[in-house]
Amino acid sequence: MAIEVGSKAPDFELKNQHGQTVRLSDFRGEKNVVLLFYPYAFTGVCTGELCALRDELPRFQNDEVQLLAVSSDAPFSLRVFAEKEGLGYPLLSDFWPHGEASRAYGVFDEEKGCAVRGTFVIDKEGVVRWTVVNGLPDARDLHDYAKALEEL
């Protein structure tokens, strides 16, 4: 079960596609965060979702908002994926311990070994203000979480 609106967002420490450590708490008091969990890099629906975000990046990564996309892929795979697709935002690896951050948010599919499509809009105080969780084959509408950001 995914964490609910009004809950304190669990902190995490993950490596990005460049091997740099990123913590959710790094943004506390500074930026709202769009935290997006996705199953795997290089897959059709995931690539479509992440490229749609790339195409509208100023809405999701600016002085007030940070976009963080998390999958169970290794950082090396994420780097190649980011370079291939021109993704200029952090892709975080939940590879080891496998799925730890996804589990903390209640979006890890134990049977498939990856995250389902969960998105959490987290305010500057670290509180979840909006969320949507879709199954593996079901793409999310980025305009829904853009609207949630506007309401913060």
Image: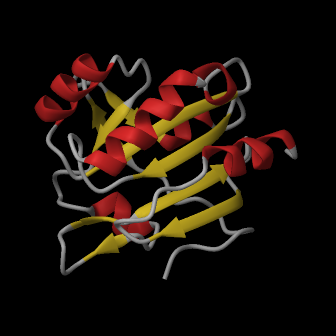
Seen at 46% across and 67% down, the residue is 105
With 86 as the anchor, is 7 left or right in this view?
right
Q: How is the image coloured?
A: secondary structure
Seen at 60% across and 65% down, the residue is 132
Seen at 57% across and 73% down, the residue is 3
From the image, which quarter does the C terminus lie in? top right
Seen at 24% across and 17% down, the residue is 83
Q: Against 135, is 148 above or below?
A: above
Quarter holding residue 107: bottom left
Quarter holding residue 82: top left
Q: Against 79, is 39 above or below?
A: below
Position of residue 9 measured from the top left corner of the image (x, y, whole percent):
58, 59
With 146 as the anchor, is 113 left or right in this view?
left
Along the viewing direction, whichever of 104 and 42 lies nearer the viewer: 42
Which residue occupies the extreme right position in the image?
A: 151
Position of residue 131 measured from the top left corner of the image (x, y, whole percent):
64, 62
Count how many numbered circles sit on residues in the image: 0
Position of residue 140 measured from the top left corner of the image (x, y, whole percent):
54, 55
